[in-house]
Image (tube, rainbow, N blue to C red):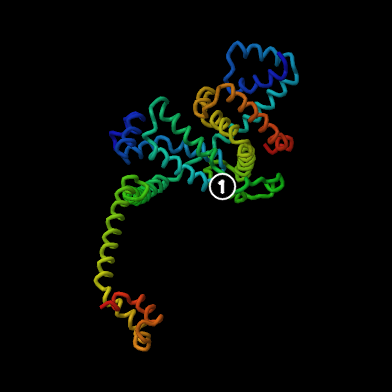
């Protein structure tokens, strides 16, 4: 196992492709699981569905390892698979839309879904509550973006991708990325302004 | 610079994706246009809120890999099942060679069966005629005078036996 830690991605994926090497696969999993999981979670906003889709992504990596031709980096290839899984996913339930009143009235246990997120240490319960409210509002706004805008926005803001890298992962031109991110920001502005005016965020 | 153009450039600028020479142009415009300046400030503050969310830790559960491993194992079982199916498909009627061979076999078998049945019928013919005679004609033969129409008819039916 330790010898695998120093192997480059390309060697690992080749071992999976040729020998279905499960320890090489485990190493790839360890390297990429947080990125894949994070992207899907930001996209779906649901933990159970994120788990399911993350499994789908890694099964695809395992089964289709031989289709990785090395024209791009392994990370780009994995992101591509993840983005496709996200876009093919049909939301099982409508995203919950909390009204401001609901958010105000809810106690700390109010956000069952979002509660699973681990919280950094905060001093007072009020701060925790404020933080949870804010996060819930932002996450819901992002979840309501159209799929392509959502993917581009998450890759840009949460994964720190350049426009060129987003273009390569999404298989579109750089100017298309620019336009997706412009529209994503405009939509977020529309969604978040009401909360801002009421001082919720 | 028109405001519509500036609006798009603000987005790229905030993502750090605007080339330096365009940044200068944009900032010049923002200094002279109050509306675009407001837009930039508003978007900046909204993206700050997103930055705030970025700190939330999202962590994959530790059991996830064993779940995937389990699915890989299940997949293998399904695969062996399908490879069995493939073996069956090889000898199924989708294969043209199989079709030809099986047609020849059917032909041989059916001619063998036909031959056997034919032999059997020939061998059993006297018996069969006897039976027919018993069922249909015997009474008639006994009760009808020779050379009458009825006897000629019954003679036709049991022609072989009658000759004997």
Vertical relation: B112 (above or below) A197: below
* Residue A201 x, y percent position in the rendering: 67, 36
For residue A186, which quarter of the picture?
Answer: top right
Residue in the picture at 53% in, 47% down: A116
Q: Is residue A107 visible?
A: yes
Q: Quadrant of the C terminus of chain B?
A: bottom left
Residue in the picture at 50% in, 28% down: A169
Which one is in front, B150 or A44?
B150
Which one is in front, A133 or A153?
A153
* Residue B124 x, y percent position in the rendering: 26, 73
* Residue A187 x, y percent position in the rendering: 67, 32
Q: Is residue B73 visible?
A: no
Q: Is residue A125 left or right of residue B60?
A: right
Which residue corresponds to mark 1? A115
Count the numbered circles shown: 1
**Looking at the image, which residue sits at the far bottom?**
B143
* Residue A101 x, y percent position in the rendering: 72, 47
**Looking at the image, which residue sits at the far right?**
B34
Residue in the picture at 57% in, 20% down: B17
Q: Please give the chain letter of the residue carrying mark 1.
A: A
Q: Is residue A79 left or right of residue B32?
A: left
For residue B21, which quarter of the picture?
Answer: top right
Vertical relation: B99 (above or below) A153: below
Disc 1: CA contacts within 10 A as few (<14), some (14-19) or many (>=20): few
Q: Of helix, strand and loop, which one carries label 1? A: helix
Residue in the picture at 37% in, 35% down: A65
Which one is in front, A26 or B139?
B139
Q: Quadrant of the N terminus of chain B?
A: top right
Which one is in front, A111 or B79?
B79
């Amino acid at each position: 196992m330790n010898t695998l830690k120093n192997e480059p991605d390309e060697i690992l994926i080749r071992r999976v492709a040729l020998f279905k090497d499960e320890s090489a696969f485990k190493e790839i999993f360890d390297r990429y699981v947080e990125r894949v999981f994070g992207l899907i979670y930001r996209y779906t906003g649901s933990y159970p569905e994120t788990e399911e889709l993350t499994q789908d992504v890694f099964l695809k990596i395992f089964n289709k390892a031989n289709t990785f031709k090395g024209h791009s980096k392994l990370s780009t290839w994995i992101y591509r698979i993840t983005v496709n899984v996200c876009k093919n996913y049909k939301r099982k339930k409508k995203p919950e839309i909390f009204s401001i009143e609901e958010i105000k009235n809810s106690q700390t246990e109010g956000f069952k879904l979002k509660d699973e997120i681990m919280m950094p240490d905060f001093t007072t319960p009020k701060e925790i509550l404020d933080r949870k409210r804010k996060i819930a509002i932002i996450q819901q706004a992002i979840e309501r973006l159209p799929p392509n805008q959502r993917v581009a926005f998450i890759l840009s803001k949460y994964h720190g991708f350049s426009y060129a890298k987003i273009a390569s992962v999404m298989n579109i031109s750089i100017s298309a990325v620019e336009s997706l991110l412009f529209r994503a920001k405009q939509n977020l502005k529309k969604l978040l302004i009401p909360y801002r005016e009421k001082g919720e965020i | 610079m028109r405001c519509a153009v500036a609006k798009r450039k603000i987005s790229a600028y905030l993502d750090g994706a605007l080339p330096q020479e365009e940044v200068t142009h944009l900032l010049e415009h923002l200094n002279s246009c109050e509306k675009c300046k407001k837009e930039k400030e508003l978007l900046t503050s909204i993206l700050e809120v997103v930055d705030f969310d970025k700190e939330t830790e999202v962590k994959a559960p530790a059991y996830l890999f064993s779940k995937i491993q389990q699915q890989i194992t299940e997949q293998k079982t399904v695969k062996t099942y399908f490879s069995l199916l493939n073996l069956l498909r090889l000898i199924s009627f989708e294969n043209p060679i199989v079709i030809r061979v099986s047609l020849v076999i059917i032909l041989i078998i059916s001619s063998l069966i036909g031959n056997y049945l034919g032999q059997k019928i020939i061998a059993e013919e006297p018996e069969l005629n006897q039976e027919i005679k018993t069922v249909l004609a015997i009474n008639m033969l006994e009760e009808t005078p020779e050379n009458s129409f009825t006897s000629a008819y019954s003679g036709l039916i049991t022609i072989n036996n009658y000759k004997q």
